[in-house]
Image: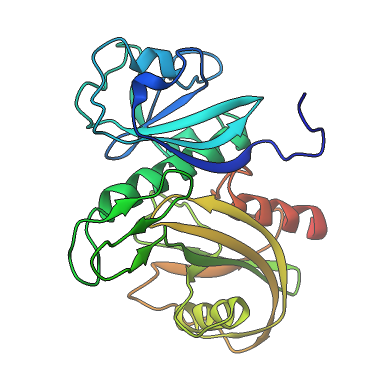
Amino acid sequence: MSDPHRPDPFICYRRVPDPHAVSLDDGPALVVGTEGVFVAPHDSPVRLPRLAELRNTSADVTAALHQIAEYGGEPVYARAAGAAGVSLPARYEEIGYRELYGSMPDEELALVSRAVQVVSWDRDSAFCSRCAAVTEPAHDECVKRCPECGHTQYPRLAPAMIVGVVRDRRLLLAQSPRFRGRFHSILAGFVEPGESAEQCVAREVYEEVGITIRNIRYFGSQPWPYPHSFMLGFTAEHEAGELNPSPIELVDAGWYGADELPEVPGEVSISGRIINWFRREYG
């Protein structure tokens, strides 16, 4: 009987040494490629493959199969697409993480993020980062141990901050050279060693547009698969200074009222949720 108080999805880990030992009826399987995961994009809603569909050809028992969670009362698995013997029916296509926003439930999108990171970590930790010996995986914990020097390697996360800054009922939006068209978003960046989340927010804003901020408040978070990171969202108020966008980081930056926003992210991302919060509060 399931526990009504248990979160769904429930994050857990188990390494399956022999994929043949897993029941064919067991759960969804996230097959991780080079740019994203394989889904059936023309199904409605977009559908993840089942583990049984990976077993239509001979499986390579040397390629790791990871149970990464339990969701909807079923185990959820992840595996690399490049593993020998791993194939899927033709209707499954590799789709990038960003492209999946809005096409599947947030819980499944979070599992996609976890699958990408676990599979990538498994590949990148095959050798000890300290002495270069071949590492040994644990079967009940997401960790690699070095038999030579004892060093342990867990999946690493690089926290990223994103912030909506408000001044006189107007929101700070900027355009990155990576954005298409007139697409704008709020400011973001990665935490440096020895820095708190709030310090990172203040530094990134100053570095990118040359202003100081105050009243930094936590808003929410979002899993993010690359580069092994998750995002913490904040709001803040302008304190001092005029906008001076960094030519290295930005094409443009400006203050926008709730009724004059340019093209911005949708609410499935934390940037979009912060922008919609601004619309509700100041519109």
Quarter the N terminus occupies: top right
Residue drawn at x 69%, y 36% as measured from the top left: 8
Which percent across, then down, holds residue 255?
61, 69
| Residue 32 falls in image quadrant | top left
* Residue 214 falls left or right of residue 52: right
Residue closest to the far bottom: 240
Residue drawn at x 24%, y 72% as measured from the top left: 130
Residue drawn at x 71%, y 68% as measured from the top left: 218
Q: Nearer the viewer, residue 153 or 53?
A: 153
Which percent across, then down, holds residue 41?
43, 20
Image height of 146 relative to 12, above or below:
below
The tally of labels here is 0
* Residue 46 falls left or right of residue 107: left
Q: Nearer the viewer, residue 93 or 130?
A: 130
Image height of 270 relative to 31, above or below:
below
Image height of 91 relative to 201, above or below:
above
Residue drawn at x 74%, y 55% as measured from the top left: 277
Residue closest to the far front: 147
Which percent across, then down, holds residue 3?
79, 33
Image height of 201 relative to 95, above or below:
below
Quarter the C terminus occupies: bottom right
Q: Nearer the viewer, residue 213 or 108?
A: 108
Q: Nearer the viewer, residue 35 or 75?
A: 75
Protein image colouring? rainbow
Which percent across, then down, holds residue 30?
42, 30
| Residue 193 falls in image quadrant | bottom left
